[in-house]
Amino acid sequence: MRSTSRWVRAEIEAIDDRYRALLTEQQVRPGAAWWEARVPRFAGRALAEDIRSLYRLEIEVRELS
């Protein structure tokens, strides 16, 4: 059972690392959990405009091709 919990912890940490890499470093909601405090590094035009309007933060616009 102990090896299972180590495996689960390692998998969760790997997922967290991949998700963190998608987010900006700047916190838009200080004090919130890291996954709630930061926004994506890139988004479609509409979301990027919403983030600019709400948080005065510029993120890269990427359109699906």
Image (cartoon, rainbow, N blue to C red):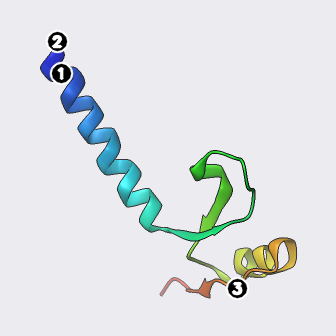
Left or right for 24, reference 28:
left
Residue 58 screen position, x and y as percent: 70, 85
Are the two marked residues, 1 and 2, in contact with CB atoms closer than 8 angstroms?
yes
Say which label, 2 or 3, has the lower sequence index: 2
Q: Quadrant of the N terminus?
A: top left
Residue 63 screen position, x and y as percent: 56, 86
User: Disc 3 and disc 1: Cα gap in Å?
Assistant: 42 Å
| Amino acid beneath label 2 | Met
Dot 2: what SS? loop
Q: Residue furthest top?
A: 1
User: Disc 1 and disc 2: Cα gap in Å?
Assistant: 5 Å
Q: Residue furthest front?
A: 31
Dot 3: what SS? loop
Residue 4 image label: 1
Residue 27 image label: none
| Amino acid beneath label 3 | Glu
Disc 3 target residue: 58
